[in-house]
Amino acid sequence: MDKVDFQKLQDSLRFLESKQRDLKRYKQVDQDVRSFESLIRYLKRDMILVFNLDRYDAEITEKINNTDFFIENVQRTIKLFKKKNR
């Protein structure tokens, strides 16, 4: 992964995290969350395809439904990339 892709991955992760927070906030007040859930599902699939995240961890596609796991996994991938490119 080059530095441009790495920056895009970080930006995508930040966006995903914000939508996950929005989803949790909306669930607390019993509002309709289907649009957030659909957007989050799309974002995760897109991130796996665009950034080839399954190359770094095969488990990521198996546990795609768990957004918290997905976010943690991408954060680990980012940390590894940073260490590798110092």
Image (cartoon, rainbow, N blue to C red):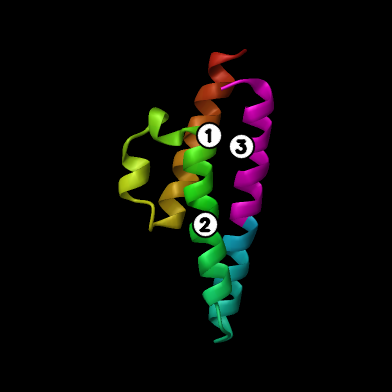
Question: Helix, strand, or loop for circle 1?
Answer: helix
Q: Which mark is residue 51?
A: 1
Residue 35 in the image, given as x and y percentages of width and height: 57, 73
Residue 41 in the image, given as x and y percentages of width and height: 48, 59
Q: Amino acid at mark 2?
A: Tyr
In the image shown, does 69 or 53 lie closer to the viewer? 53
Residue 37 in the image, given as x and y percentages of width and height: 51, 68
Rendered residue at 59%/14% (across/down): 85
Residue neighbourhood size for the residue with mark 2, other residues' Cα within 10 Å, grouped as few (<14), some (14–19), many (≥20) = few
Question: Helix, strand, or loop for circle 2?
Answer: helix
Q: Amino acid at mark 1?
A: Phe
In the image shown, does 47 or 13 lie closer to the viewer? 47
Query: Which residue position is annotated with label 2?
Result: 42
Q: Amino acid at mark 3?
A: Leu
Q: Does the magenta segment cover residue 9?
A: yes
- Which one is earlier in the sequence, the residue at label 2 or at label 3? 3
Q: Which residues are magenta?
A: 1-17
- Classify residue 12 as left or right of residue 64: right
Does 24 sit above or below residue 59? below
Whether pointer 1 and pointer 3 mark residues with C-beta atoms closer than 8 Å, the reply is yes
Residue 76 in the image, given as x and y percentages of width and height: 48, 34
Query: Which residue position is annotated with label 3?
Result: 9
